[in-house]
Amino acid sequence: MNNIWLISYLGLWLVVILLLLAVVTLARQVGLLHTRLGPSGARMTNAGPEIGAVAPLVTAADLAGRSFDLGGERSRPLLLVFLSATCGTCAEVAPAVRTLWKNERERMDIMIVSLYSAAEEAVGFVTRYKLDEIPCLVSEGLDYEYRVYSPPYAVLIDEEGVIRSKGIVNHLEHLESLVNVLDLGHKSIQAWLNAPEGQPLQVAPGAQAGE
């Protein structure tokens, strides 16, 4: 009887060891797959203005009462980040928005568009996540103009008022993939990675280092 229990005990440990080896192997394969696929870009899923189209001309006010003209020619590129105070994913991406703003504010403008939230909720949201320095617009038709109904979402508009990239943004990597179009001349990191080998790098006007 003791021998049977000992064999069962050893058998269970063998199963546990085999399972641990399987988990380690799978984790290694996932890591290799992530490396081969490269960084993920924001997915374009909405039916709003297409890449290369002129952005809608809209005038909107932020929480401080300042008026902004969106669309048309401007001195710097503009990234519109659509968020909602009632969206859990938006709360997770908020620190990434602040990080991007700190890194890119010298060469581009970033504005938050608050969806499905009253002004009071929007104020609480930007205060909680230290986004006070970034203009926050309470959506009044912006969601319809850009066909953005499921935040978090972002749209990049260049100096000529043309939409250069857009997509769902769940983390900093997604946000950076949209902004990278200013340096790579492609609408996403995937588009750059999938470009034919040897294709020259297209640098957008005004995106050279130091500008």
Image (cartoon, helix red, strand yellow):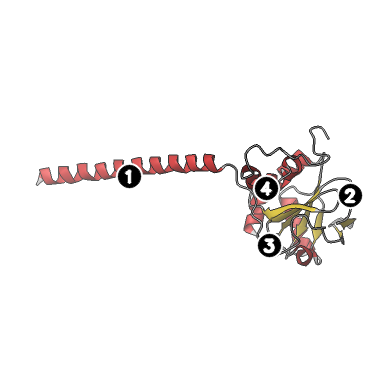
Dot 1 surroundings within 10 Å: few (below 14), some, or many (20 or more)? Answer: few
Q: For the residues carrying marks 1 and 3, which lies nearer the camera in this image?
A: 3
| Residue, disc 1 | 19
* Circle nearer the N terminus (4, 1): 1
Farthest left residue? 1
* Circle nearer the N terminus (2, 4): 2
Q: Amino acid at mark 4?
A: Ser
- Residue 66 occupies quadrant: bottom right
Q: Is residue 115 visible?
A: yes
Tag 4's secondary structure? loop
Nearer to me, 179 or 23? 179
C-alpha distance separating marks 4 and 1: 39 Å
Nearer to me, 16 or 53? 53
Could you tell me if the residues under marks 3 and 2 are in contact, i.e. CB atoms within 8 Å?
A: no
| Residue, disc 3 | 46
| Residue, disc 4 | 188
Q: Is residue 14 above or below residue 50?
A: above
Could you tell me if the residues under marks 4 and 3 are in contact, i.e. CB atoms within 8 Å?
A: no
* Circle nearer the N terminus (1, 3): 1
Tag 1's secondary structure? helix
